[in-house]
Image (spheres, grey):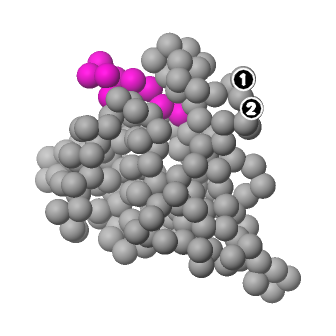
Amino acid sequence: MNIERFDSARTRFEQQAHDPEAVIGLLVEGMVAVEHDEELAVQLMALVLSRKLLQADPCAPSGHRLPPSDATIRRLRADPHIARSYAGATYQQGYADFDPAKLRVELDRGYSSTTQGIDYPEPGRAKFFLRCGGADTPRPVTLARNSAGQWKVTSLSSLTVGVRRPASEAGDF
C-alpha cells in the first residue's frame, strides 16, 4: 500500500470533512484506487465511510476496514468502468476519457432537486446524486455528520451497481 498517498488523503479528509462534496470526491478517489492498489482503496474508503459500515482493524492505518462480507471492492474489481464512470469517464468514449490525475466528480443538482442536499432528509444528513458516465441517470449517495462535525458516507450501494459496457462493445456478447 502507498502509505504516502494514504497520509495525503487523511490530511485532505481532516481539512475537508466539513464539506460533504469533498468527502464524496475522496470516496470516488478510493473507488478508483481499486484498479492499482486494493489495500489503499480499502483504507481511503475507510476514511470517509461511517463506522457502521466498517469493522475495526488495529493493524490498518485508518484503524478500520470494510468487512469481508461487503461486496464493494469485489464489484469495483470486477468492473473498473464503475469507478471510472464517477470520475469523469463515459461509456460513449469506452471509458478511455478517464484521467486518474484529474478526477472529475460531479453532482447533478437538477436531478430530483427537491430530494437532495444538506439536511435532507433530516438535519445532520445529506443526500446527493452523482453523475455517472456509464448510466442514464445519476446515482444517490447519502452522508451523515458525526459528533466531530465530519461528514461520513452512510450509503453507497447504488454506486457499485453495473454500468453500461463501452459503446465500442455494443452488440458484442
Residue 162 covered by magenta stretch: no
Secondary structure under tag 1 reads: helix
Quadrant of image for the C terminus: bottom right
Question: SS at mark 2?
Answer: loop
Residue 9 located left or right of residue 30: left
Residue at 35%, 60% (x, y): give it. 41
**Viewer-closest of 61 and 6:** 6
Type of residue at label 2? Ser
The amino acid type of the residue labelled 1 equals Thr
Judge by depth and name the residue closer to the eye, 2 or 70. Answer: 2
Question: Which percent across, then down, holds residue 30?
Answer: 39, 57
Mark 1 lies on residue: 114
* Label of residue 167 in the image: none
Q: CA distance from mark 1 to mark 2?
A: 5 Å
Say how many tags the image has.
2
Tag 1–tag 2 contact (CB < 8 Å):
yes
Residue 73 x %, y %: 45, 61
| Residue 69 image point, x, y percent | 44, 52
Query: Label 2, on which residue?
Result: 112
In which image quadrant can residue 151 be found? Answer: top left
Q: Give 118 or 170, whichever is nearer the viewer.
A: 118
Q: Which residues are magenta?
A: 142-150
In the image, residue 145 lies in the stretch drawn in magenta: yes
Label 2: how many Cα within 10 Å (few below 14, some 14–19, many 20+): few
Quarter of the image where one finds residue 2: bottom left
Quadrant that contains the N terminus: bottom left
Residue at figure coordinates x 71%, y 29% from the top left: 113
